[in-house]
Image: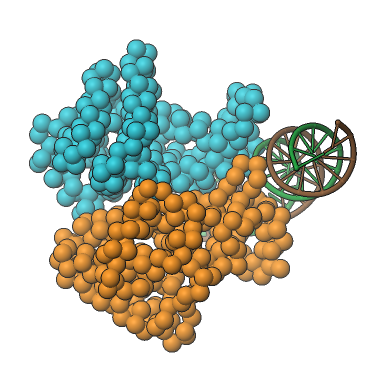
Chain colours: A cyan, B orange, C brown, D green
Amino acid sequence: MTTLATRKLSETPSLAVLAAERIERGILIGDYVPGQRLTEEFLCAELGVSRPPIREALQSLARMGLVEHQPRRGARVTPLTQHDVYEIVTLRKELELMSLRLALPDLRPDRVQRCHDRLSDMEMIVDTGDEAAMIAAGFDFHIALVGLAGHSRVEDTYHRMAMQLQLCMAMNNQARRTIEDLEGNVQRHRDLLAAVLTGELEVASTALRNHGDGTFLLEVVDTLPGATTESREWLQQLRAGGAGVPLQTT
Amino acid sequence: MTTLATRKLSETPSLAVLAAERIERGILIGDYVPGQRLTEEFLCAELGVSRPPIREALQSLARMGLVEHQPRRGARVTPLTQHDVYEIVTLRKELELMSLRLALPDLRPDRVQRCHDRLSDMEMIVDTGDEAAMIAAGFDFHIALVGLAGHSRVEDTYHRMAMQLQLCMAMNNQARRTIEDLEGNVQRHRDLLAAVLTGELEVASTALRNHGDGTFLLEVVDTLPGATTESREWLQQLRAGGAGVPLQTT
DNA sequence: CTCTCGCACACTGTATACCAAGTACAGGAC
DNA sequence: GTCCTGTACTTGGTATACAGTGTGCGAGAG
């Protein structure tokens, strides 16, 4: 057990934060699967910390939508429904478009630089071949992209959404599927950034639309429970218009 | 002190939730003003509960954006900047429009009913003359309106935003300003719902635009620190186009 | 054999006490 | 007047205890 408490306490990230990171990673990696109960006692033993920090971490994860809190029953990894996937994907598109609308009239050099930095991170990961890291880095890039708008609340919301989308991908991974080509993946993001930096809303939003859809989810999404009228309709449209759309998501 | 622990335990809302409600109310009423430190010990004494529930409540409020948590310094009521107000108002419009786009093609009777219910609540409040309750009820109505889309993540985000907007209004109240006419206020919301129920996006979004802007904030927003390029530009546009726009917000 | 009731266990929600570490402020030295 | 230092206050974390509730299992009835 542990390693958590062994990190130097002086470098201030609280144990609750560290615990949250660890659990989050466990969820996104697939160590903890959707529906699995996460009892406080178990996590205490696993991470070597006492209950209060664990409770705090679980709250934080609940806010990110990665775990669900049931009143006297504790927490479990959020079991996503088809409707959830619909919500996540539609929210994503909406937030990205809103950000572009806000950002394009006045692209700030420092914010653009942040995008380039995230792109550099991705390039460095290509060599390592670390697929999980590439996925995470891809999301960081998208967050930086949304950050172009300088709208912290939108960025926060996007961040939460990204976590949940990663959870979707984690479920997908279990159903066998990986990023086929790391370098190609980076190139796609490079192209997207270039399109955004033209400053043309039309160009940027088109690039965004073609960049990646929920298409990669199509295989798994049918197996999920919790279909609703909305989710079914969305899925139908996605299938109808999905020809020629790349299979990547991040 | 107290009354909190005296509520029957059997009806299960946890002490943390109750504490959060109480503190939230204290903030929105103006008992606790922006920037004020909220020490755990003080709140324990005030609410008659121990530290763990208080800490949990503060976390929850931090997530709603009503308090700010500083690493070793504790929590304080969020001191809003001009940029924050800009973000809140723009996010609001965006979320409401998104909801309408999603909802109008297929208005569900049960969700519409919920809007009517909230409207009824407002009507009942007219007689009591309780201004604070009217403000809260107004927000509940708007949340129900957003709920027409059946998109829980958008609704959640809207809810958080609404809390922060109420915080803005609380600041405003201190600078003297109240709802002039409760019945008129209800009527405005009645009209808005009617416009939405036409099912015409154009009609609905126009009604939304005219329903209430950040206009009521114009007096206070200048006194706030933290102006940015974005917030200044927004404010300018608001002033330019603001003629004839009602002064209400909720 | 199946269904239901009830009981024991497991876990959360809360309280309490306590320690370590960091921040802020006041007072003194230069 | 400025800088430094020590002290008080507060948070972050641990340990422990306990009550109440949900869960699952087993025994007994039909």
B131 lies above or below B241: below
Residue under the point 20% across and 34% down: A198
Residue A67 place in picture, x, y as percent: 45, 43
Q: Is residue A135 visible?
A: no
Instruction: Give left or right: position of A3 versus C22.
Output: left
**Could one spot residue A3 in this view of the protein?**
yes
Which quadrant: the N terminus of chain B? bottom right
Residue at image coords 18%, 39%: A200
Direction from residue A129 to residue A219 in the image, left or right: left
Q: Position of residue A244 (x, y in %)?
A: 10, 31
Q: Is residue A47 left or right of residue A168?
A: right
Rendered residue at 36%/17% (across/down): A125
Count of marks, rendered view: 0
The residue shown at (38%, 38%) is A163
Give x and y (percent) for residue A190: 25, 25
Q: Nearer the viewer, residue B117 or B159?
A: B159
Q: Residue furthest top?
A: A127
Front residue of this view, candidates B48 and A41:
B48
Residue B198, placed above or below residue C3:
below
Of residues A235 and A147, the one drawn nearer to the viewer in this rendering: A147
Q: Quadrant of the C terminus of chain B?
A: bottom left
A30 or B211, nearer to the observer = B211
**Location of residue B219 (image quadrant):** bottom left
Instruction: Residue A44: give x, y in percent of width and height.
Output: 60, 34
Residue D19 position (above or below residue A172): below
Q: Quadrant of residue A218?
A: top left
